[in-house]
Amino acid sequence: MEITLKGDRKVNDIPSLKTKALRINLNENIYGTFAEIGAGQETVRHFFRAGGASGTIAKAMSAYDKSFSDAVYGVEKDGRYVTEARLMKMLDHEIRLIEERITRDKHPNKMFFSFANTVTTIDFAKQFKGHGWVGIRYQVEPDQEYNQISLHLRFKESDARLQQETLGVLGTNLIYGAFYKYNEPKKLLRYLYDHLDKDQIEIDTINFSGPIFENVDNRLMSLQLVKNGMTDAVMFDPAGNNVLPARILYKKNILALRGSYRPVTKVNMDMYHKSYEMFIKENKVDENNTQVIFEITLSNLRAEGEIDEQDFLDRAKLLCSLGQTVLISNFQEYYKLVEYFSQYTKNRMGLAMGVNNLVDIFDEKYYRHLSGGILEAFGKLFFKDLRVYLYPMTDENGHLTDSENLKVHPRMKELYKFFKYNGKVVDIADYDQTILSVFSREVLRMIANNEPGWETMLPEGVSNLIKQKCLFSCVSDDSVKEIKE
């Protein structure tokens, strides 16, 4: 008999939804409420059907009417209901009620929880497939502070009933994982897809908090979402927090810079500053409505083999310390990145890149999987009035390469000329000539070999952070002194 594997388990070893719900119900100390808005009471239904729910479910409700929902949870300033802020208000309200109504003196061993979701399913025109926020706030010890897991999902199915069923499965997996897999958060993440396929649902943001998750880095959990194929991209704000990409990118002008940033150098920041100056001067670009994104692809993270999580965190910390928003994506080709941005905005976009990256864009081998080949890719890349800001490079002989003299494959020469002539590729003219010889890989080599001089190749403050945090295996000054002594 053929045995199918899902992740690290045989499919036959995955507990059924009934088994999961029943295990929760039969735990006499787990007790809480379900509040579900927008897609019916799909999660709690699994717990009612499993049996033994009277000892687990204190209350199940669906404040489906907006006016009634406002009366229970308050009015949102932006008038929206499917938001993280709404989810937090629901969890706050329900936990407060259960604490008020179920006294600890009568129930000293109870571990309270509140599960909530606020969701919109596919519309009648089937243009917007729907999305939602799902979360659980809960205890694993009666006298412990509350823990929390919250996530954002996007539906991929084209039928409202199927989306509702998918939501119920996800909710059951979340509650079960929260109580029985909390000590293995990476596994908990994968198990959210038990009895689900990745073409049913996408999870693009997740956050863990509370005493049992104090050692969990939410940026690493986001990286797992991309590694596991649960989403194509995740985003961190300058404070290093996970943020919903849709909230950051919605109706914005976007300037994106792709790199390995291992580590971020003066060249990277000069490219950013000079391209930004050019971008905000473009027609229809409002500086106050412009978002800059520093993107690292999964292929960049895998450049040295398997993804080194510490190395990933080092890069993210440096970029965030410079006040940048970071995107980790699974988009090897640039046109996929532009397609992704196009989900959230119709405003002007720009890509800042070096010469080598632009030459790669005109390499046909990256587009053999497309029926229309490179022409299809370029149609997707440039149809949004996108512009490439090109940063020059010098070779070992000091020869400068820019948009005027770069060489693409002979078959691509006329295509390149077309885009260049139509202003789709423009040179960054006001660049810093003194730093063109700076390369991340050389800086990394010098750091690894403890060679002097690499500090001057990095933006102000970055070298100090690398030394203080011992990033990229950097040996601190104190360690060097100890070795010499």
Image: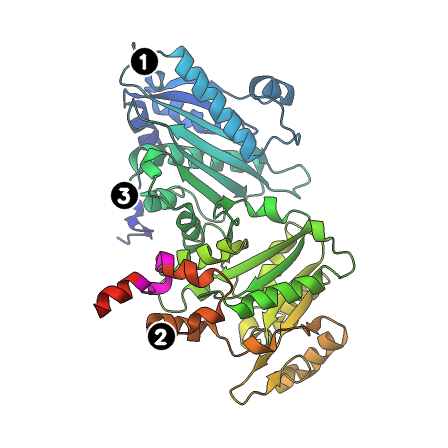
For label 2, the residue is 451
Q: Is residue 397 above or below residue 463?
A: below
| Residue drawn at the location 27% of the way across and 15% of the way down | 108
* Mark 1 residue crowding within 10 angstroms, few (<14) / some (14–19) / many (20+): few
> Is 50 positioned to the left or the right of 413 in the image?
left
Q: Residues within 10 Å of mark 3 (few under 14, many from 20)?
A: few
Up-down relation of residue 383 to residue 405 (above or below): above
- Span highlighted in magenta in the image: 468-477
Which residue is rendered at x = 66% and y = 29% of the image? 79
Marks 2,1: beta carbons within 8 A: no
On screen, residue 172 versus residue 359, left or right, reads: left
Q: Nearer the viewer, residue 156 or 30?
A: 30
Badge 3 or badge 2: first in the primary sequence: 3
Tag 3's secondary structure? helix
Circle nearer the N terminus (2, 1): 1
**In terms of depth relative to the viewer, which is nearer, 436 or 153?**
436
Residue 104 marker = 1
Asked whether residue 484 is in view, the answer is: yes
Residue 329 in the image: state x and y as whole percent: 50, 57
Q: Which of the 4 image quarters holds residue 103?
A: top left
Q: Is residue 346 visible?
A: no
Give the prevailing secondary structure in the magenta stretch: helix
Frontmost of labels 1 and 3 is 1
Q: Nearer the viewer, residue 468 or 321?
A: 468
The circle drawn on residue 13 is 3
